[in-house]
Every structure is written in C-alpha cells, then in structure tokens.
Image (tube, helix red, strand yellow):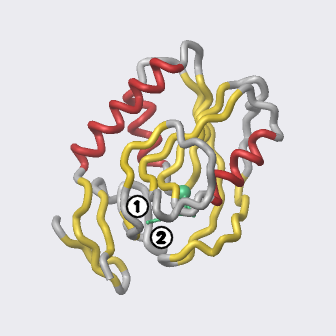
Amino acid sequence: MTMIQLHDKTFNIYIPHDKIQNRVKAIATEIQLNHAIPVHFVVVLNGAFMFASDLVKALEMHCKVSFIKVSSYEGLESTGVIKLKTDLATDIKGEHVIIIEDIIDSGNTVEFLMRHLSTKSPKSVEVCTLLFKPDAFQKNYQIDYCAFEIPNDFVVGYGMDYNQMGRNLKDLYVYKS
Ligand code: IMP
Ligand code: MG
C-alpha cells in the first residue's frame, strides 16, 4: 500500500520492508563483530518490539532479551516527561547491555534509560536504534548502531504508532502535513 489512514491522518509509504531488513541484517553483523561474549538486549516497549524481533533473529550469537516500558509521546508530540511504566524484570549486573529503541528524536528517552540502567551496574551500555532524527536530537551521547537517519518527520509502522494504531504495518510510513 502506498498510502494509509490512521485515525484522522493520512500517511505515505516511506521505507519498505525489504530495505528495513537489509539494514537490520547489517546491524546484526556489526553487533556480532563488536561482541565476542553474549550481550543482554533491553528492548524499549512498545515501539521497538518488531525491530528487536527481526534483529535478534538475524544474529548468529547467543544473547539475552529483556523488556522495559517507558512512555513520553502523545499523538504527534513528545511530552518531554518520561515515565517508567514497567521496569526490567531481570538482572543486568556485570553484563554488556544494548538498548534497542525504535526511534531517537529529542534523545530524552534514551538518556533517561541510560541513567536508569547504569544504576543496575551493567558492565557496559550501548544504544541501537532503528531510526534517528539528527535535527531533533538535543543530547550528545553516542548512538552506537543506527539503521536509518531521517528528517524531522513523524513516522509510523514497523512497531511505531500514531495513538496506538499502525504498529503492525511491516513497512514504515511518514506523515507530511
Ligand atoms: P525522544 O525521547 O524525544 O527521543 O523520543 C523517543 C520516543 O518517542 C521513541 O521511543 C518513540 O516511541 C517516540 N517517537 C519519536 N518520534 C516518533 C515518530 O516519528 N513516530 C512514532 N513515535 C515516535
Ligand atoms: Mg520508543
């Protein structure tokens, strides 16, 4: 489909599934080259579930996968207030952690998560994101793995939502006002 309707808004096709898969495989290879021992992926719910699923399937190494849930977005805007909805249920002490995010926009969410996870004494914390909006980024931490840099547009699909709809779409779509 080249166009979809979610609630009151229309979105256009942006990055098709096969292009996403190519980048996911390349990132899996990068992670494997950097890590000889198993890593512990911390998947940021809800948006990163689909990316994380494809990424760990593309990996040819053992790993742990855990989940953490935060929220900051309402509609098309970040509220700027990060809420920890569900904390990790597993220990990360002494482990190499890689945070898996759907998208880094202002950078607030991942900064919050890096601070929060570092209180649990991991050996290292890296960041892996499907999408990155450099024009919106207000922080200066390093993003270790990134599939696509995109302009400051609102996207849905492949895990990401507009007011909870669109997460199941296998392609990425963009809203142009
Ligand atoms: P940040 O805290 O401003 O970096 O925003 C990150 C979070 O906001 C991401 O984890 C997403 O859940 C959400 N988000 C940011 N941009 C978009 C977008 O274009 N579409 C859907 N969700 C987004
Ligand atoms: Mg997210």
Question: Which quadrant holds the C terminus?
Answer: bottom left
* Residue position marked by numbered label 2 in the rendering: 164
Q: Please, what secondary structure does the residue beneath circle 2 have?
A: loop
Q: Which mark is residue 167?
A: 1
Quarter-of-image position of residue 72 = bottom right
Residue plotted at (34% across, 77% down)? 6
Q: Is residue 176 above or below residue 136?
A: below
Q: Is residue 8 left or right of residue 71?
A: left
Q: In front: 65, or 110?
A: 110
Q: Is residue 53 above or below residue 36?
A: below
Image location of residue 125, percent across then percent down: 66, 34
Q: Please state which amino acid type lies under the numbered disc 2.
A: Gln
Q: Is residue 54 above or below residue 59?
A: below
| Direction top: furthest residue | 36
Residue plotted at (59% across, 14% down)? 37
Q: In front: 118, or 134?
A: 134
Image location of residue 140, percent across then percent down: 62, 50
Q: Please state which amino acid type lies under the numbered disc 1.
A: Arg
Q: Is residue 140 left or right of residue 20?
A: right
Quarter-of-image position of residue 33 = top left
Q: Are marks 1 and 2 in contact (CB under 8 Å)?
A: yes
User: How far is the residue under mark 1 from the one under mark 2?
Assistant: 7 Å
Q: Is residue 38 left or right of residue 33?
A: right
Q: How many marks?
A: 2
Residue plotted at (37% across, 82% down)? 7
> Around disc 1, counting alpha carbons within 10 Å, would you say few (fewer than 14), some (14 to 19), or many (20 or more)?
many
Q: Is residue 29 visible?
A: yes
Q: Is residue 38 above or below residue 12?
A: above
| Direction bottom: furthest residue | 8
